[in-house]
Amino acid sequence: MTRWARTMIRFRWAVLAVWLVAVIAAGAASSGLSSLLTNRFVLPGAESDKARNVLQQHFGQKPEGSFSLVVKGGPGSSTALVPKVQQSADRAASALPTGKVAAVNAVSEDVVTATIVSSLDPAEAKGHTDAMRNAAGTIPGAQAYLTGQSAIEHDLDPVMSNDLKVGELFIAIPIAMAILIFVFGSLAFLLPFMLAAAAIPVTLGFLWIFANYMELSTYLTNLVMLIGLGIAVDYSLLMVYRYREEHRAGRSRMEAVERTMETAGRAVIFSGTAVAIGLALMLLMPLPFMRGFGLAGLLIPLVSVLAAMTLLPVLLYWLEDRLDRVRLVPKSVRERRADPERGFWPRLAATIMRRPILFATGTIVLLLAAAAPVLSLQLTPGSNTGVPQNLQSIRGLKVLTDAVGAGALAPSDVVIDTGRAGGATSPKVQAAAGRLVAQLTSDPEVARVDFHEQGAQYIDASRRYLHIQIAGKHEYGLPPAQHFVDRLRDELIPGAGFPGSVKVLAGGGPPGGVDFLDMTYGAFPWLVLAVLLATYGLLVRAFRSLLLPLKAIVMNLLSIGAAYGLLVVAFKFGAGEPLGIQQYDQIEGWIPVFLFAMLFGLSMDYEVFLVSRMREEWDKRGDNQAAVTAGLAKTGRLVTAAGLIMFAAFMGFVAGSIVGLQQFGFGLAAAIIIDVTIIRALLVPSVMKLFGRWNWWLPDWAARIARVEPSPLAAKSGSPQPALRPAGR
């Protein structure tokens, strides 16, 4: 690291030039990123995905990329409206590449709907929404709304962009700035923002490249910008403060940068790798939607570490002293903070060392109590009710819901594959299809069944496939809709008596939602196991200990469990309403998975910062209590400040108007605040006091595997290890 630091300083102008060019190029490229993002779930290999493929290849439609023109007239006007809606829908379809009107139906006495399908994906289709609305025009005496998943995504894009701006400009950045000014006490608080201004655009530029070849979620821009700010602050805090400590000890600027890279720089590499491991393993999930999160989560810590290892040493050498001369906090306050023997953190450390059992027991009980509500957790694959209700697409959905049922926008699709051309006209197949339609019509969850034996939307040109569409009474993500899928697949379809050679596939909204949850949580336990094993191996190298990585993993699981429990309390039980959180019974299915991967990595950030300094003190002193006390006193304030800034960044999501993002932000914010207050400040030092010198044990055989120096319980003759004190010291 010393040689690396010297190289960065020697070529500092080249380093600055490379980052400047990278930021400008990435910023230009990522300006078109939002148009490439989508919220579509693709479920490779699932039954619902097979049904979707049949509809696309043989009926010329992608249900998730379709539009619905919903027209509401006066009482009893639906019959007269049908030809006018047909003409309006034809005009709208002409503005959509490969678009065609699949059906026009009067669904109530005053509501008529037209379904417009195409072969486009939602990310492609949504860009034509405005053109379709203009082409559809108006219908005298009626109100027309263009809705559908693509239209909803189009209408939500500016809402999400505005939510991000509000979260950043009015919550995350002001709070981050206030905390950094207080912590740094000078204009040096600008350094973390400089690092974020480099890392975030470059990460978005990489995402723009990948978005041209794979499906990425519309949430990713928010994710990268807010988490990127938090990570940049984390790394800057640790490295700037270590530079100051070394510089004040009498080292030159170059020597201080070198020492900073050897210590804090090493910790940043390990912590960034821990974050990247947690999220990179999501790339192994069977769902492209999840893999997109994994890609973004892999890129932002890696780019941030790269910036911290190249750009930040240059900024420290070139700017830190100059910026530090402009004081924003009185000198007496700055000097008191710089004294490791005085202040809040040394006193807290001393208190914990006196009563470790009390602190350890109390915090564990508190965390378990916070985690208990997770037993009431209900998952949903998604919802359109947790978004602003004033959008045209959502108002159209409301009209359609009132007329037909909440499941009308995302109906179930039953695809019948007879296995041969003309097989759909077989009397046995027709009879079985009739029995299935009769069963569906009498099912308590079904609001409407659409099936006409001669319609192009219901039988393909080769007459091999039949298509039955079912609108439910509840939205596709709600429990009644999910229970209906179980009945459809396990009872209704088998009970219809199709010939043995016929394959019947259930797809569309509710079946797709069920398949999404099944695939996600079928793979999730393996993701958890992989993250635990990879993280343990990484931390053995970082801490040179067998026990500390295990302790870190258990504490992280406690923190994440508590965050899950508080998520239920805030949304399902409605306790978050005073904070502007919308009460909602279910948690979106992707959130617990992503929270686990993200939080496991971020929590390790603080663990590495704290315990690495304790390890350093132990290597110097050989006194466990002194090492734990000094480590907490010297890094507690930094870890807490970094956590509060990350907390503010995540609360930017909560300030938005979309329930999914609120749940995501609240879960992250809750876990971070628990982690930096209860876990790192209280539980870690108390447990490490109780473990004594066993904290630092790494036998020879384990050291050989990890390829680091051993750390025996007792110093060997001639060993550079310091003489160890009794356990507990």
Image (cartoon, helix red, strand yellow):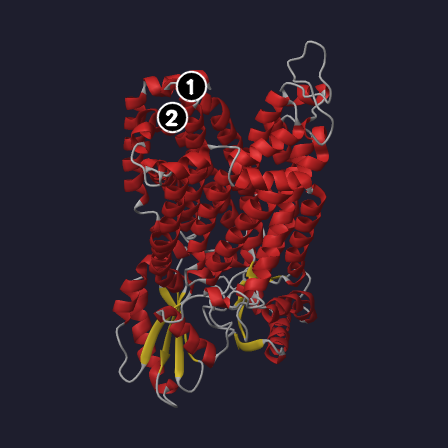
Numbered mark located on residue 313 in the image: 2
Residue 120 visible from this viewpoint: no
Q: Earlier in the sequence, mark 1 or mark 2?
A: 1
- Which residue is found at the position 51% from the left and 32% from the top? 340
Q: Secondary structure at mark 2?
A: helix
Of 333 and 288, nearer the camera is: 333
Seen as rendered, the residue at the extreme top is 718
Q: Is residue 240 above or below residue 88?
A: above
Nearer to me, 441 or 363: 363
Q: Disc 2 residue type?
A: Pro
Against 322, is 448 above or below? below
Q: Is residue 264 left or right of residue 323?
A: right
Q: In this view of the protein, can residue 722 be seen by the observer?
A: yes
In screen coordinates, is 559 left or right of 244?
A: right
Q: Residue 55: x percent and y percent?
A: 49, 60
Question: Which residue type does callout 1 highlight?
Answer: Trp
Picture coordinates of residue 567, whole percent (x, y): 57, 59
Residue 14 position, x and y percent, is: 29, 22
Task: Write down the quadrant of residue 534 in the picture.
Answer: top right
The residue wearing badge 1 is 4
The residue at the point 51 percent across, 39 percent down is: 343
User: SS at mark 1?
Assistant: helix
